[in-house]
Image (cartoon, rainbow, N blue to C red):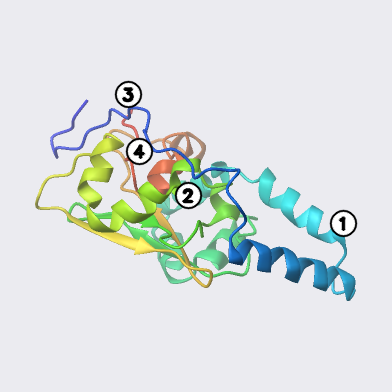
Amino acid sequence: MSDPHGHSHSHPPHPYQPDLEDAPLTHYQILELAVAELLIEKGIFTGDDMRRVLENIDSRSPADGAKVIARAWVDPEFKSRLMADTNAAAAELGIDAGTIPIHTVENTPEVHNVIVCTLCSCYPRLLLGLPPDWYKSRAYRSRLVREPRAVLAEFGTELPDDIEVRVHDSTAELRYLVLPMRPAGTEGLDEAALADFVTRDCMIGVTLPRSPDG
């Protein structure tokens, strides 16, 4: 279904496949394992400490990010604080977004933002949960910076030519979160109802929030 602005709201399954899981460890993966073993050996933290951190990350879901977006849609002052300091704004809602800075980029009628990590899979996991396999794939990481409109179209997001597409490359020092535009027809809904319209993919920027009519 398309709206008057030319946005498509049909989201077919995305074709990208994850990189092979059984490939040999890369230099950086070996380095990561070695550093972790060294820190455990020196007593900086324990194996249980590391396990608990990983379990905490694994337990996160896009629902936390959706709460943040919904509050920004209904509270202009919160939205300003979110744009200035995403981590601190999330903390206002009792959500720990971690210590790595997250920068929120806002979609407008003139600009559409989309996120990638061209080197690996840097991603605001504490707000969105684990990244999807396609986000980590070589195809997505390499193609999005070269042909963003073509990649978005494969997600069912076809944008008019007069909308600027901005691609943001996440790093180990900075992550991004997309603040999508609030769907028309949601006036009067409370935050909990609005959060239902916010998906992981629209906070990455590859899709748009669904409209109330589906």
Q: Which of the 4 image quarters holds residue 167?
A: bottom left
The residue that disc 1 covers is: 48
Residue 91 pos. (x, y %): 61, 61
Q: Is residue 197 left or right of residue 181?
A: right
Upstream in sequence: badge 2 or badge 3: 2
Q: Residue furthest front?
A: 24
Upstream in sequence: badge 1 or badge 4: 1
Residue 4 pos. (x, y %): 13, 35
- Along the line of sight, the residue nearer the viewer: 145 or 53: 145
Q: Gap between marks 1 and 3, in whole Å? A: 45 Å
Q: Quadrant of the C terminus?
A: top left
Look at label 4 and name its amino acid. Pro
The residue that disc 2 covers is: 136
The residue that disc 3 covers is: 214
Look at label 2 and name its amino acid. Lys
Above or below for 7 versus 34: above
Q: Gap between marks 1 and 4, in whole Å? A: 39 Å
Q: Gap between marks 4 and 3, in whole Å? A: 10 Å
Give the crowd class for mark 3: few <14, some 14-19, many >=20 residues within 10 Å: few
The residue that disc 4 covers is: 209
Q: Is residue 16 left or right of residue 100?
A: left
Determine whether label 1 and label 4 are within 8 Å by CB: no
Give the crowd class for mark 2: few <14, some 14-19, many >=20 residues within 10 Å: many
Which residue is found at the position 67% from the left and 51% from the top?
57
